[in-house]
Amino acid sequence: MAYKIIGSQCTNCTACEALCPNTAISEKGNTFVIDPALCTECIGHFDSPQCVAICPVDDTCVIDPAHPRYQPS
Amino acid sequence: MTDLGQELSTMTANSNGAVDVAEIMQQVAEHKGCGTSSEGGKASCGTSGGPEDMPPEIWEKVKNHPCYSEEAHHHYARMHVAVAPACNIQCNYCNRKYDCANESRPGVVSERLTPQQASRKVLAVASTIPQMTVLGIAGPGDPLANPAKTFETFRLISETAPDIKLCISTNGLALPDWVDEIAKYKVDHVTITINMVDPEIGQHIYPWIFWENKRLTGYEAAKILTERQLLGLEMLTERGILAKINSVMIPGINDKHLIEVNKAVKSRGAFLHNIMPLISAPEHGTVFGLNGQRGPTAQELKALQDNCEGEMNMMRHCRQCRADAVGLLGEDRSAEFTTDKIMEMEVNYDSVGRAAYQQTVEAERQAKVAARKEELEGLEAAQDIKVLVAVATKGHGVINEHFGHAKEFQVYELSATGAKFVGHRRVDLYCQGGFGDEDSLETVIKAINDCHAVFVAKIGGCPKADLAAAGIDPVDQYAHEYIEKSALIWFKDYLAKVASGEITHVERGDAEIRQGALISVA
């Protein structure tokens, strides 16, 4: 599963964008979005997903059940 | 217009027309500035005394910086550009989701700028407000959590407007990594917010920090934060960069501990300590706002500031401004300079006019100092008596504001050593459109309840009677006179009445610090 950003809670602070090891995060309208095709949940990069760790609003970067769990190759 | 004002106008008429200083002074007068300088030395915010009170190289750095010099903040304006939205820590007094146009507090902005937009905005503001001397990056997140945007902004501005002072306000977590870059761009004023030097206390203020790609919480997070803050401060001091320390006073959490913070930062070379009251209105949605954590009263804040004063300067004129504020401290003209508007504005960077303005300010400052010195004789009669007085002023060091029009009052402490600026009290507007509002008068009385007198240019009969009934002497006979000189004349008269037994000196009670959104006034 990839992570997704709950748009209504996003403060547009940009903090996650620079931290994403896969450059999966970009600005879209008044919020930021995660490209599920690029998100690896930070597996293989960091101990915890960076967008979740830096986000100033709790429960805003969350697992998106619509996408299968990332499998490191 | 005061005599001094007329003098300044004459100077303008004789100048080469590069700048209309009278118009500038008028603009300044139209905005709510505040009182005057203080009693010299380390008095009010430390740098208040002037060139005689500090080494020349330090005076050069602070003399036109409104945040570092109480003296300067009456004359010079600052602006913040909101290029740094990301933050690397979470504080319990901050909620980044809340942004209201009427809101005035740190961490809040209405729009985020690119470095190019910020540079354009600085030129537009400098063209419109020649007394704008300082450009700060203070967020709305942490400037050093957005290093590329922050330093690109500094680079662009130092190329186009080299006389503007650059400053930065940071939580300090990333500071040690960027001190050399800060020095490279000649940023010579750095503010670090340090609320504790003990992680046991810090864990109640900071829920988490982002450190080495992890979110850390509790004691561990606070320990790293304090170590990084103090290391950063030491590195700044080594490089001769002036450091101001901001501390938020949170009763029951760090109020007593801030004495330790003061010692820790003093010993590491901090130039100025600014202890600010916690802002914790529930509608801001911060942790402290929601859990009912109160802010300090006016007397609690003053007592702590007094305790910390000594070898180190205390700042008492901070207005806790927004991360995109524009104008003199205590005013916010950011709505005049939105991105859409600055793109339309004609930009004319007039360095000659800016220098001329600064000369007039120096003349005005010297006149004020001279007036103050006249009344320092004969104060020994005060012995241990100290009283606070509130002053309604639009700036220039004179009592020139109507009681009902004052959005804030300057507070001076009068004692055997003279008159000393010790703070300001926000009251918003008591009188709007000529209609006095009884409830608002109560608000004003609460805000200055610890004062023995209030000095105004003019006041109506009803509020005058109500103030007197509340034990606050309404004084309007010094309209358009210098604040400190008038206050000292009044004080000597007060002391004479106490000595003759006509009145008895009694201590006043406490006062409230106003919270909540500022009512914006057109």
Image: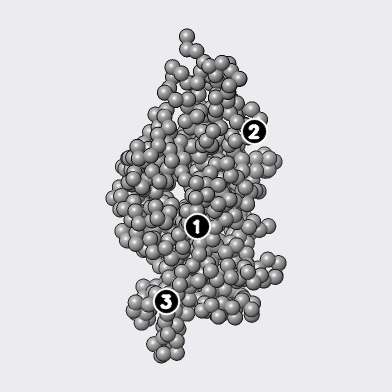
Q: Give the residue at mark 1.
A: B73
Q: Is residue B115 visible?
A: no
Distance (Cα) linking label 2 and label 1: 36 Å
Farthest residue, direction front: A65
Farthest residue, direction left: B267
Query: Mark 2: which secondary structure?
Result: loop
Label 3: how many Cα within 10 Å (few below 14, some 14–19, many 20+): few
* Position of A44 relative to B357 (above/below): above
Q: Quadrant of the C terminus of chain B?
A: bottom right
Give how far across and how far down residue B259 sits, in percent: 33, 56
- Name the amino acid, label 3: Glu
Q: Are marks 2 and 1 on the same chain?
A: no
The chain ID associated with circle 1 is: B
Q: Give the residue at mark 3.
A: B507
Q: Give the residue at mark 2.
A: A30
Q: Is residue A33 visible?
A: yes
The figure's colour scheme reads: one colour
Label 1: how many Cα within 10 Å (few below 14, some 14–19, many 20+): many
Q: Which of labels 2 and 1 is toward the front?
A: 2
Q: Which of labels 1 and 3 is toward the front?
A: 3
Of the numbered discs 1 and 3, the one sitting upstream in the chain is: 1
Give how far across and how far down residue B253 sits, in percent: 39, 52
Q: Are marks 3 and 2 in contact (CB under 8 Å)?
A: no
Query: Mark 1: which secondary structure?
Result: helix
Distance (Cα) linking label 1 and label 3: 31 Å
Which of B520/B281 is in front? B281
What residue is at 37 percent from the left and 79 percent from the top? B382
* Position of B499 relative to B38 (above/below): below
The chain ID associated with circle 3 is: B
Which of B300/A9 is in front? A9
- Name the amino acid, label 1: His
